Structure formats: C-alpha cells, structure tokens
Image (spheres, rainbow, N blue to C red):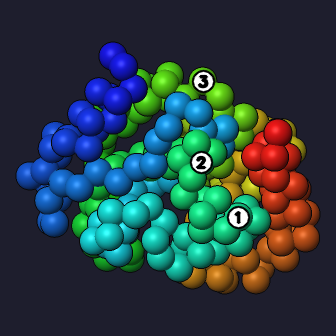
Amino acid sequence: MNTCKLIEQVSKCVICKSHLPLGARPVIQFNPNAHILIAGQAPGIKVHKTGIPFNDASGDRLREWLGLTSDEFYNANNIAILPMGFCYPGKGRSGDLPPRKECAPAWREQLLTALPNIELTIVLGKYAQAYHLPHTKNQTLTELVKSWREYWPTHLVLPHPSPRNNIWLKKNPWFEHDVLPALSIRVATILNK
C-alpha cells in the first residue's frame, strides 16, 4: 500500500470508536522522510480537541528536551509522531486511560515499515516501551532511563514530559545533567545532516 493511502486510512480509522468517550480522531504526524520517531502513549484531551500532537504542556517540555522549536518539531519531514493509540482513550482514576488495544495491531507495523529513515526512536511510556523494547518490560522507568546508553544512539527511553512527572524529575537530577544534553546534541546532529 502506498504511503498516502495508508495515512488516509489511518485518518479515517474508527475501529475502537464505540470505546472512545469523544469518538475517533486519530492524531499522528507522519512522513516517510522522517529521521526521528516519537513513540508515545495516546493523545490527551487537548490534543484530541486540536488535532495537533503534543499541543500541550507535555509538548512544550518535550520540545525543550529535544532542543527544537515548534516549527522544527512539527516538520513531518524530520519528526514522526506515532502514539501507541491514535485517539484520546478517555479519563481514568489517575489520569488518562491506556491506549486502546486495537490500534497498534491494526496500524503500527505498516506505519513503521513506511519509515525507512528513522535514526532515533524516543520511547515515552510503558506501552511504547513494551512494543519498542519488549525485552525491558520488567525494568522500571528509572532503571531504563539510567541505562540509556545501552540503547543509544538508536533508542532513548524518557519519562513522560507531563507536569505530572515533576516529582520524578526532582528525584532524578542526573537525567537533566546526563541525558538531556546528549539527546539535544543527537537530535541536532540528525536534523542538520
């Protein structure tokens, strides 16, 4: 299937519509030329409303970590954004619900195959971790982030950039000093080729 047809089909996907409180609205950013993949969880409510990935406080922090402006971040020729679930899953007791289980089996492999130029995959959250680094499923987030050099330079596990993770960031100051400078240099190197 050609890429344009694939993206059109993804944008019209309704396979889990009956389980979504606000209906289906797949939100991805995709171009086969992209060199960096951001593999997240699922869009939040603000992203659902705007249709723009990471159009929230998490996105502001993520762009800061990557060392990118909004224009650079939203350039699909550089950055692909494929959450594990493409639609807002709804609210749970302590944040948003997990991504819907139907999404990744239906689309992920096809989309990843259509991204031949990916040099760095940024993994956000346990569902993306389970898919992209399945052998690490028994490790905690802190263990994974601390062992970042084991997957470098092709993969990097990050804590979710949500303000909900401010406590984790305060408890782990090494992240800001060790990981983030390497990340921004790697991103700049990839995008400035």
**1 vs 128, nearest the viewer:** 1
* Residue bearing mark 3: 116
Residue 133: quadrant of the picture: top right
> Reading the chain from its start, which is encountered first: label 1 or label 2?
1
**Amino acid type at image mark 1:** Leu
| Residue 147 pos. (x, y %) | 82, 49
Residue 114 vs 35, above or below: the answer is above
Residue that badge 2 annotates? 79
- Tally of numbered tags: 3
Mark 3 → mark 1, Cα distance in angstroms: 22 Å
- Please report the residue visible at 35 percent of the width from the left and 54 percent of the height from the top: 27
Q: Of label 3 and label 1, which has the lower sequence position?
A: 1
Q: Is residue 74 among what the camera can see?
A: yes
Q: Are marks 2 and 3 in contact (CB under 8 Å)?
A: no
Return the residue found at the far top: 1
Residue 139 visible within the image: no
Pointer 2 local density, CA inside 10 Å: few below 14, some 14–19, many at least 20: many
Separation of residues labelled 2 and 3 (CA atoms): 13 Å
Give the residue drawn at x 81%, y 59%: 184
Residue at mark 1: 68
Mark 2 belongs to which amino acid?
A: Ile
Q: Quadrant of the N terminus?
A: top left
Q: Are marks 1 and 2 in contact (CB under 8 Å)?
A: yes
Asked where in the image residue 19 lies, by quadrant, the reply is bottom left
Left or right, residue 21 beside residue 153: left
Sequence order check, earlier mark of 2 and 3: 2
> Picture coordinates of residue 69 (x, y %)?
67, 68
Give the crowd class for mark 1: few <14, some 14-19, many >=20 residues within 10 Å: some
Q: Nearer the viewer, residue 142 or 79?
A: 79
